[in-house]
Amino acid sequence: MKITVNGKEQELDIAPDLPLLWVLRDHLQLTGTKYGCGKGLCGACTVHLDGAPVRSCQTPASAAAGGLVLTIEGLSSDASHPVQVAWQEHNVPQCGYCQSGQIMSAVALLERTPSPSDAEIDSAMAGNICRCGTYTRVRLAIRQAGAQAGESQA
Ligand code: FES
Ligand code: FES
């Protein structure tokens, strides 16, 4: 099957029910997307499929066939995406394990809601669990990235 990942079309000889997470990590060596719970509960495996955030551990490869997948590696080549910059400025990560999923959820939120309210941030990020408790810094970084997007549009 064909799946376009980070702008590059990939021809893959894989079982249709293989979770997208393992397509990315094992077949394409895109290991920035993490395996946490494997049950759709933690958000560590979040990527975008056709612009929407999905849990790649719960997404069969067949669902991504012909689609556009974006992973943390595809946001920018040099960590210059505005959300990545805000993350660096607020020193968001602790152990880092959950952070690519956090960032992918945040990017999806800001793409559909450039200046989210606190309630919108809480709602969009509720499925991303951080065992290190970085939630406060995650929200600060999202607010900053959202405010900068608003300024650049003004
Ligand atoms: S690993 Fe997919 S939601 Fe936890
Ligand atoms: S930074 Fe450690 S789990 Fe989130």
Image (spheres, rainbow, N blue to C red):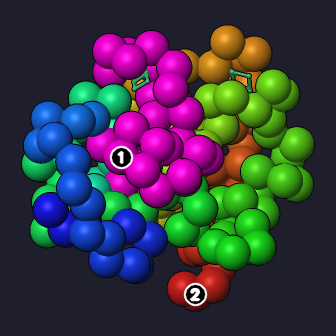
Q: Secondary structure at mark 1?
A: helix
Q: Residue at x 62, y 29 (%)?
A: 98
Crowd tier of the residue under label 2, counting other residues whose Cα lies within 10 Å: few below 14, some 14–19, many 20 or above: few
- The secondary structure that most of the magenta stretch takes on is loop
Q: Is residue 40 above or below residue 74?
A: above
User: Is 121 in front, or is 127?
Assistant: 127
Between disc 2 and disc 1, the foreground one is 1
Q: Is residue 150 above or below residue 62?
A: below
As drawn, which residue projects farthest toward the front?
A: 13
- Which quadrant would residue 4 be assigned to in this image? bottom left
Q: In the rendered image, which quarter contains the C terminus?
A: bottom right
The magenta stretch spans which residues? Answer: 20-48
| Residue 13 in the figure: left or right of residue 115 | left
- Which quadrant would residue 54 be assigned to in this image? top left
What residue is pinned by disc 1?
23
| Residue 64 in the figure: left or right of residue 36 | left
